[in-house]
Image (cartoon, rainbow, N blue to C red):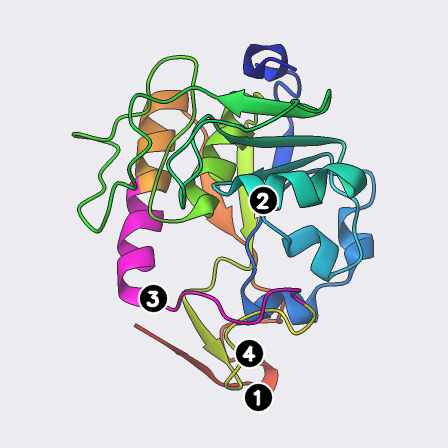
Amino acid sequence: MQLDELRNKHEGETIWVLGSGPSLNFVHASVFFDESVVATNFSARAIGLRPQYAFTHYHANAANLVPDTDVVVTLGGDTLTQKPWQGEQPATLALAPQKSYAPPGAGWNPFGPHTPPQGSLAYGSSSLHGAMHLAAFLGASKIILVGADCGQIDGADRVNTYPVKDGHTLWQLYDKHHKLMADWLRQEYGISVMSLNPFINFNLEGHRFTGV
């Protein structure tokens, strides 16, 4: 599959983008039934949801996600090995072309040296940035993030059932970069980007959030 086949496929829709943060523990998969969803890595699998789309920086993750995702999108070069896709490309896998396979690092900025190339997707410090851009590429009029928490709830870093337990906890860096990505999408695509609070208000119904 070519990435360009996905351009504006969901034009004008609200698209939900799932991170792997602990607020997903308080959101039932049924919320996303009949909705357009882009999962980041294994976030949809963690809540028992088969998503239409998943984005990952990692080719091993992409291959793992193909059986239970309608379309998987990854970068042309793997973040860890910095090599192009190895072997046969599955029919439901799209590769986003990129100029450099090297991770962008802490200085990542889509407004400057890391502006995504035309016809490709953002290569940020987190796979969430590519997932957000994929939602915009699909034609979203609104993006709602779920589980993009940049912190802990009741001491948990991630949704409890996430299949990979050891994750990055660079909350301050991710908080900065998530905002840059949202601002860039607002400017480039003219869309709204917001995040779901699964509680009735910011008091979190007695749960405790710790972040940056």
- At x 45% / y 27%, what residue is drawn? 84
Q: CA distance from mark 1 to mark 3?
A: 22 Å
Residue 11 in picture, x, y percent from top left:
62, 18
Query: For the residues marked 4 and 3, what is the alpha-carbon distance in whole angstroms?
Result: 19 Å
For the residues carrying marks 2 and 1, which lies nearer the camera in this image?
2
Marks 2/3: CA–CA distance: 25 Å
Q: Give the mark nearest the N terminus, 2 or 3.
A: 2
Question: Mark on residue 71?
Answer: none
Q: Amino acid at mark 1?
A: Gly
Position of residue 71 measured from the top left corner of the image (x, y, whole percent): 70, 29
| Callout 4 amino acid | Leu
Quadrant in which the N terminus is drawn:
top right
| Disc number for residue 204 | 4
Instruction: State the mark number for residue 206.
Output: 1
Residue at 50 percent of width and 74 percent of height: 157
Q: Nearer the viewer, mark 4 or mark 3?
A: 3
Q: Identify residue for label 3.
A: 171
Depicted 177 relative to depicted 112: above or below:
below
Q: Mark 1, residues whose alpha carbon is within 10 Å: few (<14), some, or many (≥20)?
A: few
Quarter holding the C terminus is bottom left
Q: Secondary structure at mark 1?
A: helix
Extent of the magenta region: 162-180
| Residue 16 visible, this angle | no
Image depth: mark 2 or mark 4 in front: 2
Give SS at disc 2.
helix
Question: Which residue in the structure is indicated by mark 2?
Answer: 60
